[in-house]
Image: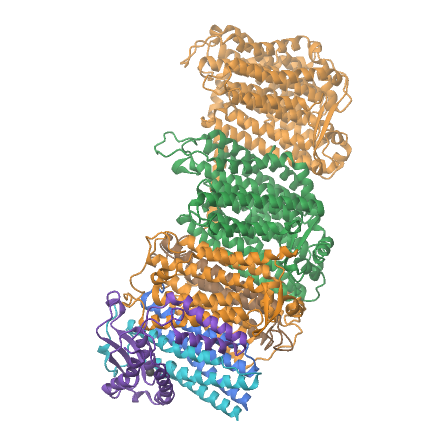
Amino acid sequence: MELLYASCVGLLVSCGVFLILRARTFTVVLGLTMLSYAVNLFLFSSGRLSLNQAAVLGYSSEYADPLPQALVLTAIVIGFAMTAFVVILAIRGRSDLGSDHVDGKLPDTNKKVNA
Amino acid sequence: MIEWIISILLLIGGSFVLVGSIGLVKMPDFYMRLHGPTKATTLGMASLLTAAMIFFSTTQTGLSVKEILISLFLLLTAPVSAYMMIKSAIHHKLDSIERTKGKDNIEDDV
Amino acid sequence: MIQNLTFLPVLLPMLAGIILLMPPLGSKITRRRITSVVFSAITFLASVALLLKVQADGMQVYAIGDWSAPFGIVLVADPLSTLLVCLTTLLGFACTLYASAGDDEKGSFFHPLVHFLILGVNGAFLTGDVFNLFVFFEVLLIASYSLLMHGGDKKNTRAALHYVILNLVGSAVFLIALGVLYGVLGTLNMADMAQKVALLQGDDVYLAKIGGLLLLVVFALKGALLPLHLWLPNTYSTAMPVVAALFAIMTKVGVYSMMRVYTLIFGDEAGELSHMAQNWLWWLALATIALGVMGVLASKDLRKLTANLVIVSVGTLVALVAVQSIEASSAAIYYLVHSTLVTAALFILADLIGRQRGNVVDSIIAGPPVSQPRLLGLCFLIAGIAVIGMPPLSGFIGKVWLLKATLNAEYTIVFWLLYLLASLAIMVGVTKAGSTIFWHHQDKVTEVFEQTRVHPAQLVALLILVSSAPLMTIFSGPLSEYALGAAIQLHDFNNNINVILSGGK
Amino acid sequence: MRLEAKFKWLPTPLRSLLLFIVWLLLNNSLSAGHIVLAVILAIVIPLATSLFRTKQPLILKPGLALRHLMLVLYDIITANVQVAILILGPNKNLNPGFVKVPLDLTHSLPITILASTVSLTPGTVSAEVYPWGESLTEGEEPEERFLLIHVLNLEDEQALINTIKQRYEAPLKEIFQC
Amino acid sequence: MLETVILIVFAIIGLSLLLNVWRLLIGPSVPDRILALDTMYINTIALIILYGMSLGTELYFEAALLIAMLGFVSTVAVCKYLLRGDIIE
Amino acid sequence: MTLLWIPLLSLLGSIISSMTGKLTRNQATSLTMLMPIIALCMTISLAPAVFSGDVIRDTFSWVPLLGIDIAFRLDGLALLFVFMILGIGILVIFYARYYLSSNDSMPKLYAYLMLFMTAMLGLVMSNNIIQLWFFWELTSISSFLLISYWWHKPEARKGAIMSLTVTGGGGLALLAGLLLLGNIVGSYNLDIILASKEIIQAHDLYEVTLILILLGAFTKSAQFPFHFWLPHAMAAPTPVSAYLHSATMVKAGIFLLARFYPALAGTDIWFVIVSLTGLVTLLFGAYVALFKHDLKGLLAYSTISHLGLITLLFGLDTKLAAVAAIFHIINHATFKASLFMATGIIDHETGTRDMRKINGMWRFMPYTATLAMVAAASMAGVPLLNGFLSKEMFFAETLHQQLLGSMSWLIPVFATIAGALAVAYSARFIHDVFFNGDPIDLPKQPSEPPRYMRVPIEILVALCLVVGIFPNFIVNDILKAASFAVLGGYVPEFEVALWHGFNLPLLMSGVAVAGGLLLYSQRRHLFQFQESLPTLDAKIVFDGSIDAITKWCQVKVNAIENGSLQRYLMLIFVVVLLFAGWPLFEMNQLGGQKQLTPIDVHNAMGAALLMVGAISTVIWYSHRVVSLLMLSVVGLMVSVAFTRFSAPDLALTQLTVEVVTIILLMLALFFLPQHSPKESSSLRVIRDVGISAALGIVVASICYALITRPLESISDFFLANAKTGGGGTNVVNVILVDFRGFDTLGEICVLGIAALGIYKLLVNLPLLMPTSDSEGRPWAKERYPILLASISQSLLPLALMVSFYIFLRGHNLPGGGFIAGLVTAVAFILQYIAHGSDWISERLTINYRKIIASGIAIALFTGVGSWFFDRPFMTTWFDYFDIPFIGEIELASALVFDLGVYITVVGATLMILASLGRLTVNAQEEEVNV
Ligand code: NA
Ligand code: NA
């Protein structure tokens, strides 16, 4: 199970990073979202995996580590705020720069801007 | 006895859910695919949720009927979801299979 | 109230931010300005009061929610963090004042955002909890994203996009680092982490090392250490100068965090992990200085030049952090204050100069003469001398000190050579810029533009920042004693741990 | 047809009742505290959201409404079995089609209820309500409306239209008195 | 017996989910994929309810409820996007 | 009386003179001269003590930590320099009064001059080597200001930058050297350093230290090859040149040699470096001086040459050479200052400095000519003048050295050649300017200058004569005292006299004079030869190298900071890979000892769905809507995973956030292109795949390593205290609102600020709104589908109720303010989707900004509330109350805090969406409820 979990996290990281490395704001945002899933899962797992041990007192005899859960919760909220901002910034960028290309200059191979 | 009821409800529910999904995969065009999930799945869910309701009401300390809420929700929203989806399919002029009747009843939405 | 003094540098900016969003004080621009400036002044005074208290009574530990470390979040006010809080709030005061001359109206929510930024920076300086540090990083980042776009143009948008995206990746790395560290150490309080790191065994050591090094990536990104510095020149030079001036403190947050993490958690007592980042920091710092200097020489306008000076100052600071001795840390503390104020002053000067030169703005080319050459020239002279590190201004003390402090480091010769060459290059760059801007005038002025003059509010802000250079020289005696005290405290592992974990007793 | 409720403080009595029940359902509790809270919420929430409610006909025959609901539920269950069979059977036996059902209903709430009913009962999915709101001027109710439905297996178009109109539309007209 | 039944139904729901994913992957049109995703949301509700039953806890009920609510909203949003481009106009 | 007053008075003079703008020129000049005159009187009063061998000291503490004190010290050497600095300074100020035209700002020049004087005084009187460096650099800065006095002239700007660069660079080397020196000795105190010759010279770092210090000295005193800045510094007004390049600035380097002579000299390396540098400079300067057509150019190179001479003397390993060096310092100062001033008069009167134009000045200004000729003769080393005496001593000392072993005779030969060159250029100065026919094309008609402009020259020339004829009478005391200081105690017997009898030095002088005159008479051939040589203009080379370096930096920096976000990101990822990957290889075993959980079918299937979703997102990334749908599969599976692994709160949060994010992305998609063109080259794709795969593997490995190890954490405390200390059974929620409520406070700030920032971004944003979708379909006609519109109205109360339910239970069961807030927000978003923002804004006239602020305020004040109970911020309170009929209820301050969270979340989310919605609806309208 642990191996599977770790593989999932790794795969999400890979996909996120790959998307982030594309040169368009939207894909970057997708990548960031994916990366934040991975990160949240990772941070969550720092309290180790436990089945059916939700940290609600009285519901089980042993409890999962509640602290990483709280941390991930905070991280999710902050990540949400950041994603919202970057999405709007991407819109702003499209409107200011005429394209959603994030690199300094357009690559030569792509003369026509996808506008 | 209650266990039996729960089990049967669960199996019925599961079957309907599965049928919905089979319809989703099996049907030849979008409009036909829509039928399965909209109806069969919704009903299957209602059945499953009823099973859960009975299960929790009998095994836990007290009556537990809040699963009704989910059923209510699904019943309320499933038609609207379907309606929105079919609207967008019509908007996208998705092909229906050839033998579909009454295609001319569709008005151009632009 | 007095026992809550430690909390005020965090509370007041948040309060200011809230009040500035609400009627009646937030509804009219004049009221907003007055409220904002008054609040930043109060915040500064509260910080100074805290500094005096720390001087008098020693380190202050404030357990939020009455949950003591390591379980709750504690704020730790020691000489270093309070000094930086004072620096931040002073800068905040100068910037709100400066912007009140009109810059604040070039977009919405300038004043609340500045206060939120101060909140983030102060929080990051004061917190003793590593996840809370993350939260405050995010507070200051999100405020900085918005401020970056204040009154921005298209160039600005691209820089902002880059800055935001890079920092989002940085935040992801931060979280992974925190995950690793929590997963190994089972705690978040820095002092407690330090204690636990010392006890690590087996492969756990390497996991902790990964966590520590990933933190380094984050701090290097925030602090603009090579090769993660690339965002800075464009970001700072396209931001509105008053914002850039305020940002002068932000790179220091990264440096400060390095100081904390690599002297407390991975410091002398960390066993196998002690000083694990030292080599990285040292060489990266040197490379940062080199690249920053190249940027200084390559800069085509004053803001870009100043932005590159920020990079050089980061490199210098990190080199000092890498030495990890009390002397180097004290030099770093002095130099940090000096470089922050001076680069902030230069950003503001670049703005004022640019406003008086028409279309040429602050480009380092011949242009129309500024309308107030004496005032601006003198201020530029002072800031320039200070930033070059020549006597008689604060830069020279920093320079002497840091050279002295690195005297017995490994590879001193490389650092000295590089640093001295860098100083020379900066001297050439700044001198050329100054002489071109103030002395090299266009033969005939074709363009007609409105001759603006420095607004009184701008003037006061400018003078506050510029006067820091002579003041830091005159009072370098007591300041250096303070910096030394702060450095000693920073390096006093056992005392830090004991005081923080016992709730300030 | 009536658009305004009798009591200003209880603009939608049935909805309030629903909310009252829902609260108790959610908390699985009939304790005094929850009942008090449920009453408060059942009154406060509709008032608070009343701005977000366009005027719609009220249910004037609750008994009939309940009976109709039962009928629909029954139809859902029985007819679903048919759909399951249709789905599982060979595709070639299916004769899909689009049917335009003329409506007597004009208000959007009853139309919505009708369309939903149609969608949930076997073999049909509501697709469009013609004409669209956009082709009408502000506040105008159209002369005649149609419901476009997709039928999974269309055998007799007119029979289907009749079923829908009689079995589902007529009771609605009765319930809303419109 | 109930445990076995729950396991069986788990498998059924799992199979349904796989079918949904299959449709999601092959499309061919965007509405098809939306439909598949919408169905997936609903099947996930089933999954969570079954999970709660197998553990004998109702702690996960709210998750199911929220999926029901939010799945609807996101389906509607995507459809609105396809229809009008601007979902809040 | 303290020594501090001497530089302080001159500093005061600088300040005073800068404020004399409103006074007449005479008043300004007198006022400016007043301070140095007082200082001079003070110095004179101190002189007897110094002559008697005392060293006067004065110390104040400044930065004790760094060993930097304000420490002054007046010994013979310092006294000599103070006299020169003040004396010539006063004369220069007086001279400048007549030199400056009415366009030139007098207060500025005076202020700079006095500042420079301060720096020089401080430098020569320093008793702390860091302070010495302090003043050293001040001389660089103030000379920069002086040279650039006429900043509108490009040559002034360039000359100033060049001099600052060279001397500043040398200053940096000097600093390094001094710091090393201080480190060797263990003190920056000059007294101690001067007494530590043995320690210093035995130290490993002696050579480095010496070279660094000499670098400072040589750059400042324009020794070859650092001499090139000096001629370009001639762009300064002549009084400045007279001051800086005769007596002060360039002598600072010489002063440094003299100052550290007791500590650093005496080794072979010292002698070799110093003497050879001096010799080369001496010859080179003298040679070039001969060919300069510019009067000041000639003087500049002559200065270089004389500085070389003095340096050479310090490099000769005899004590008398040092005495001769000091003597020549005095003499050079007097004749060169007067020559500069005379040149200034000529320049002033003729409007040019070109010797090819200036001819026959004897006729126009005989008196000035006489003075200039006397001074020039002294420069040439003609008997009866002071220049002769020191040159004689110099010749004598070149004969006494053994530097080059058997080839040591070369040095006197070169010295004689240099002497001849000096005679030649002096002769040229005299003949070409004052005789040699008629002037050519002079811009002005020359005549004698104002009477008083000559006074300073008269004084200096008189000194040349008096010293030259009665050396013992005038300079003996000061020379002795200075030598005493330089030689560190013992001064050999010497006699400065006009006549030593016929001896070798006299012969050398004779040869020099004869050779010089011969050279001058044959100058035409020499000039021709010189012109055939390629010219090397230092300015062009210097500017060229600076430009080349700048260009190079620009090219490199642009190549590195190429504006490519992908590159910047790539760097981060590579660094992460390196930092996170490396320690993995150091580990012995990746997995830990924890009991592993077996894989069950559900988990495997969930993982499979998650992976399929993730990979599909990547595969379809160019088809954005599809990609987004795939991404929501991942989001859904993540929340299922949270459910599975006992984190119901996380699951709820993830779900709600997920939906809002998807909606935001949908919104964004409308304004962004619908497709991402695949534009990366295959190579880049391969590279990116490699990097991302590697990163994935590394993170996965770390994750695996972590979760297979047992963990001891502080969480037991939270589990144990949640109910008793925090009043709730949902431990995660108690952590969020109590144990770590401060994080939550920060988190809602982030959310609020983000909303403000988004609003800010969208103000006045011109938008590209597509009228059709990516395949060219126009948008559907129906804006608000009827079914959706009416169902959403019914759902709103239901959703609000659910959100209230989730909010209320949060403390004890999964839920809480944040999730409830998002549910509320989603319910409203649905209204936005179903009805549009116009419809909403007609109904909802709430200012979201205020909502956010009140939300944060509620949370903040809940925290502050605990102050009234004398508890730290955010100390929570809760209690249970038994209310009749209703039963026991719990009241907790955490609930109020959570309410703040709820309100902030609702406000922020709606503000974001309302801002976006407003864009398309009412681009013109200014303020819409936000
Ligand atoms: Na139907
Ligand atoms: Na001539």
- Compared with C103, F120 (above or below) is above
Q: Whole-percent x and y of residue F907?
A: 46, 60
Instruction: Kindly tell me whether residue F332 is visible in this rendering.
Output: no
Q: Quadrant of the N terminus of chain F?
A: top right
The C terminus of chain F - image quarter: bottom left
Chain D rendered in what hue?
Answer: purple
Give x and y (percent) for residue D89: 35, 90
Q: Nearer the viewer, residue B58 or E52?
A: B58
What color does chain C have in the rendering?
green
Chain drawn orange in the picture: F
Chain A tint as drawn:
brown
Counting from the top left corner in percent of width and height, residue F558 is at: 46, 47
Q: How is the image coloured?
A: by chain
Which chain is drawn using cyan?
A: B
The answer to whether one can see residue F840 in this image is yes
Chain letter for blue?
E
Of residues D52 and F335, the one nearer the viewer is: D52
Marker count (numbered): 0
Which residue occupies the foreground of this view, C454 or F772? C454
- Above or below, F543 against F352 in this view is below
Image position, residue B2 (x, y; %): 52, 91
Rendered position, C422 above or below C275? above
Would residue D102 appear left or right of B30 to someone viewing this image?
left
